[in-house]
Image: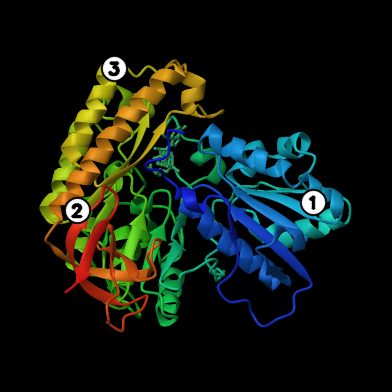
Amino acid sequence: MFEIAHKVQDESRQGEAFTPAMTPDKQFKRLFYIESYGCSMNFSDSEIVASILFDEGFGATRHLQEADLILLNTCSIREKAEQTIRKRLTEFRKLKHQKPSLLIGVLGCMAERLKSKFLEEEKLVDLVVGPDAYRSLPGLIVDVNDGQKGINVLLSREETYADISPVRLNTNGITAFVSIMRGCNNMCSFCVVPFTRGRERSRDPESIIKECRDLFNAGYKEVTLLGQNVDSYYYSQATGTSVPQGGIFHTQPSLSGITLINNDTSKSKVGVPYNSSPEADRCAVTFASLLEMVALISPQLRIRFSTSHPKDITDEVLFTMAKYDNICKYIHLPLQSGSNRVLQLMNRSYTREWYMSKVNRIREVMPVCGISADIIAGFCTETEQDHQETLRLMEYSKYDMSYMFFYSERPGTLAHRRYKDDIPEVTKKRRLQEIVDLQNKLSQQSNKEDLGKTFIVLIEGDSKKSNGDWMGRTSHNKVIVFPKGLNSLEPGSYVEVKVNHCTQATLLGEIV
Ligand code: SAM
Ligand code: SF4
């Protein structure tokens, strides 16, 4: 399997059964079992689903046998992700036979993409619920119990689940995801996300700050702000609008609210041709101002974000990152391809030269900043020369790590409609392997450059290999393992660690 070395998802978490860290002190009449697949957004959505089901009197279980409701939160990004779900569903057949009252539901992107076709194709499935329809789950469960099939795949222009407090599932109590926006307006030609997750909308900043503050007060030390394209976050306090109306406006964040200090339209956002509405923009919160507001909650709370579209990551965001020590110095900057011709076919709206200048700018503003990328091998018409340009751009950018894929045609996307998926699988896989090999070399080099340096590390828990060692992360997102020693540290502690050795994936150090 070629997507093994570095993937967009943490493969060890794919299909993970989710239960909350603490079961509320309540007797549940019914139990649900949920597995999540795909990106962090899906894992975060499962926590919203859990919250909705808890309110309906459902408790969570990790054991399939005792579940009354089995949910799969699915991903459609590549064909293989969908095949995994189909296969998993067949494994529930016996359970359903043993317990006919058992309900099986499919949530998320695959539900949205296939809609009622799913119910026709997979007779076992009772519920099909798209990413914007989770609030209707309780009603749909009633419908199914009344003998109907339950389906809601309506996409929304407003839904952000802002008022729902996610029930943290499988948490380490230290790091948490906080969703700040949903959907995507970008229409990259290879991507199914705009069709499965709908139009972009941003969540009310007050609810984001409240969620982050509550997490910090509960002992969490790191939040990752999530969205398909976080840098285009935009919320107008005046109108409650969650899509951009004008240029970038500078707001003075404060914990009590948001005060305007400057409305410099000269710093307008790259490629955001929205109609200006002065009233809406005067009180607008951009991604940079949101970052600042979260950073001000406490210097002890680290902030990460994912994922950025290179075209939207502004100087304002970079300067805000540089200004606050607790905003982690790490940017995921998906490349996709290093060839201008392919980038144009992909509808990525930047060139390799523009992307290189963005990498330069990041390093200029933040000399120590981790950079990672997403790369697709074998997109339609990709030549050996295009592929070489991708490899050269990887070398130029010196990524610390990458998520690498071969192109998988998705029905309904622009690429599916316009271009032929003409690169033979064997070529796609060979090119992907070359990309993976180069990334392994770059990761090793990047780690070697950290030898002898000391970093502030947030301890996340025991290392996987030994409970005599801690595992934590540096600000620039490198995993570091070090002996616990005699210190009275615990998960959530910050500690200075000197790097003595490294592997391709991990730094090894000691407390100083
Ligand atoms: N919004 C992010 C961005 O624009 O960079 C990416 C989100 S997408 C869920 C994650 C990654 O999956 C993409 O960056 C891309 O590399 C990969 N991907 C998306 N569609 C794909 C496809 N049809 N085949 C292979 N990889 C794909
Ligand atoms: Fe897909 Fe492009 Fe949107 Fe990312 S920015 S989710 S790749 S359409």
Circle 2 residue = 315
Which is more foreground, mark 1 or mark 2? 1
Circle 1 residue = 95
Q: Tell me, for residue 384, which label it has, or none.
A: 3
- Seen from the viewer's position, the closer of residues 417 and 441 is 441
10 Å crowding of disc 1: few (<14), some (14-19), many (20+) = few
* Left or right of residue 37: residue 240: left
Residue 487 position, x and y percent, is: 27, 82
* Screen quadrant of the C terminus: bottom left
Residue drawn at point x = 75 percent, y = 59 percent: 65
Q: What amino acid type is highlighted by mark number 1?
A: Leu
Between discs 1 and 3, the one toward the N terminus: 1
Report helix, strand or loop for mark 3. helix
10 Å crowding of disc 2: few (<14), some (14-19), many (20+) = some
Q: Quadrant of ligand 1?
A: top left
* Left or right of residue 446: residue 199: right
Residue 138 position, x and y percent, is: 74, 62
In this rendering, does residue 284 appear at all? yes
User: Does residue 26 lie above or below 265 as drawn?
Assistant: below
